[in-house]
Amino acid sequence: MRRTPRLILIAACVLAAGTACGGKGGDPVTAPPTFSSVMSPSAAPATSAAPSPARTSARPSPAAPSWPSPADCVSYNPNNLTVHYEAGIHEVRDGSKVVARLHGGPGEQIGEQGLALAQRYKRHCFIGRGNGREDENAYVFDYWRDSSGKRTTIPGEDEACSSYDRGNLQVNDMGSGHGWRVKDDDHVLHVFDDESDARDGRLVLAKYGKICSLGSPPDDDQDYVTYGK
């Protein structure tokens, strides 16, 4: 019996180590796994957003007062005014309340002027009352507030008023205790007891371009009224 060819065949199968001999011819040969030595870059650390600048709320500067404060005023009903004359004084009254006093003779139109002026407003205001000076009235300044809506005619008003430049108003000390004044260059508009009163007067005068005076006192310490227009 010849066995050599069979032994050679067996040896060949052993050497083939799992090839077609005795194996499943349809199975694929599995390749050994491979590993990459390339490392993926690590993720960059997240950066936080820059902090927003702190918000500061600046407080607006308080607005400058538009009228003297506190105000010294007499309130009245412009529809209830009458004029009374006695001993050289024309009084404009609301009932028993005295609204204005103007010095003048019995035949003058001072009372009519004062009445027409008062009827235009609802408040008669003052700067400097109670200043304690011997000639107190000379240092009291009048102004008028709260229009009534009436357009009354003041007799002889053009002669009672003088113009000034409200952009050129100056406040200065007259010295030697004589008080303060508000003026437009050489045009003195009014004198006041102290600097505070003078600055309040300037505040009022800066709203107008004319200053008017009613009444015909023999001197500045007598009763008269002023107003701006």
Image: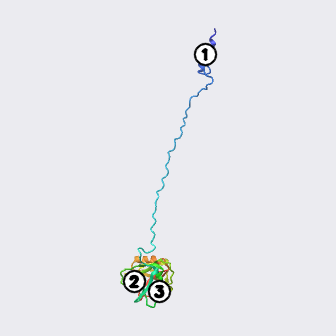
Q: Residue at x 60, y 16 (%)?
A: 10
- Amino acid identity at mark 3: Glu
Left or right: 35 in relation to 74:
right
| Residue bearing the label numbered 3 | 112
- Amino acid identity at mark 1: Ile
Tell me where residue 15 appears, x and y as whole percent.
59, 19
Q: Earlier in the sequence, mark 3 or mark 2?
A: 3
Q: Are marks 3 and 1 in contact (CB under 8 Å)?
A: no
Q: Earlier in the sequence, mark 2 or mark 1?
A: 1
> By what rule are the colours in the image chosen?
rainbow
Q: Is residue 16 above or below residue 106?
A: above
- Could you tell me which secondary element the residue under label 1 belongs to? helix
Tell me where residue 225 appears, x and y as whole percent.
44, 83
- Could you tell me which secondary element the residue under label 3 belongs to? helix
- Amino acid identity at mark 2: Asn
Distance of label 3 from label 1 (alpha carbons): 152 Å
Tell me where residue 66 appears, x and y as whole percent.
46, 73
The image quarter containing residue 1 is: top right
Q: Is residue 11 above or below residue 40?
A: above
Which of 12 and 143 lies nearest the eye of the viewer? Answer: 143
| Residue bearing the label numbered 2 | 137
Tell me where residue 38 appears, x and y as whole percent.
55, 37
| Residue bearing the label numbered 1 | 10
Q: Are marks 3 and 2 in contact (CB under 8 Å)?
A: no
Q: Which label sits on residue 49?
A: none
**Mark 3 Cα-neighbour bin, 10 Å: few <14, some 14–19, many ≥20:** some
Q: Is residue 8 visible?
A: yes
